[in-house]
Image (spheres, grey):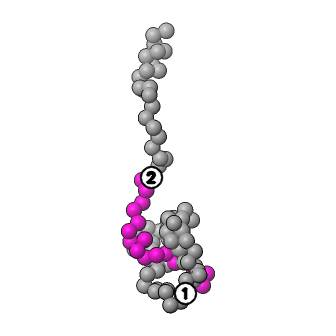
Amino acid sequence: MSTDQSGLHKKNFNPVDWVSQAGAAKMRGVTRQAIARLVRKGRFTTLFVGGRILLKRSEVEAFKPKSPGPSPKGKHSKKKGDAVGKRLAH
């Protein structure tokens, strides 16, 4: 989702629609480093102005974090006790 919008025409740029990484962190109650990680992962549309990265305010407000940890895998066909039962039977 990360998009460099540096080609925007000045007439289309509305500063109210954009927020700094520090501002986004304050809005969400997280650290600036957490926001920077999300930017690197491409979770926000970005705009580079004067060497600073700005984020689309509406995306920051609507952001829903993914659940932590690895993605769920398919269910295993074996039950947990199957391997134990086979060893004890021999």
Q: Residue at x 43, y 35 (%)?
A: 75
In front of the other: label 2 or label 1?
A: 1
* Residue 69 sits above or below residue 65 on the image: above
**Residue 49: x and y, percent?**
57, 83
User: How many marks on residues?
Assistant: 2
Residue identifier under label 1:
9
Mark 2 residue type: Pro
SS at circle 1: loop
Quadrant in which residue 8 is drawn: bottom right
Which stretch appears magenta? 50-67
Mark 1 residue type: His
Residue 49's label in the rendered image is none
- Looking at the picture, tell me which residue is in the foreground, 44 or 68: 44
SS at circle 2: loop
Quadrant in which residue 62 is drawn: bottom left
Distance from label 2 to label 1 (Cα)? 38 Å
**Residue 86: x and y, percent?**
46, 15
Per the image, is 65 magenta? yes
Residue identifier under label 2:
68
Work out whether residue 37 can be spotted: no
Q: Residues within 10 Å of mark 2 (few under 14, many from 20)?
A: few
Q: Residue at x 59, y 81 (%)?
A: 7
Per the image, is 33 magenta? no
Residue found at the very far right of the displayed protein = 51
- Looking at the picture, tell me which residue is in the foreground, 72 or 87: 72
